[in-house]
Image (cartoon, grey):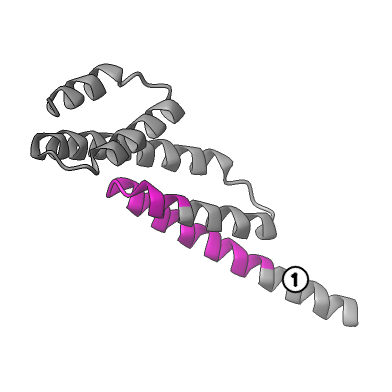
Amino acid sequence: MVNASLNGRQKAEREGYRIKARYELEKADAFAFMSLPITMDRHLRDACEYSQSAEMDISARVEEIRREGYDNGMLRALVAAKRFAGEGKPSVEIQFKRALFYAAYLGKDISQEVADAKNLLQ
């Protein structure tokens, strides 16, 4: 009798973890769409933790969301870098680093875009 109730409890916990993992994936997807990859990554980490407890494989979906978020984040960082370079703001280097990090993950070469933006500094 104890094993049966424990099994039911484990099933309920696992279902709770599944629900939470799907929720975190939805949040991550929304932040990827909004070009907010840092927040997106936090929700992806949470989704992965919950999915492990739920014994579900979400790796393909995580990669899909991460690639979208990094692509959007790279573009956003490049736009910000160009704007900051034109205004002479010192935080331009942070945007370059972000854009280059995301591009490296995606296997994209954005060296020309970075060079063009850096030319605005001169």
The correct choice, above or below, for 30 with respect to 71 in the image is: below
Magenta segment includes 31? yes
Over which residues does the magenta segment extend? Answer: 14-41
- Relative side of 71 to 5, left or right: left
Circle 1 residue = 10
- Where in the figure is residue 113, as x and y percent of width and height? 23, 22
Furthest residue in direction left, as rendered: 87
Three-letter amino acid code at the position of disc 1: Gln
Furthest residue in direction bottom, as rendered: 1
- Where in the figure is residue 110, as x and y percent of width and height? 30, 21
- Where in the figure is residue 118, as x and y percent of width and height? 20, 25
For image coordinates 17% across by 21% down, the residue present is 116
Residue 54, picture quadrant: bottom right
The correct choice, above or below, for 49 with respect to 115 in the image is: below
In this orientation, which residue lies closer to the viewer: 11 or 51?
Answer: 51
The correct choice, above or below, for 121 with respect to 9 in the image is: above
For image coordinates 27% across by 50% down, the residue present is 34
Can residue 27 be seen from the camera position used here? yes
Secondary structure of the magenta portion, mostly?
helix
Quadrant location of the C terminus in the rendered image: top left
For image coordinates 35% across by 47% down, the residue present is 32
In this orientation, which residue lies closer to the viewer: 99 or 64?
Answer: 99
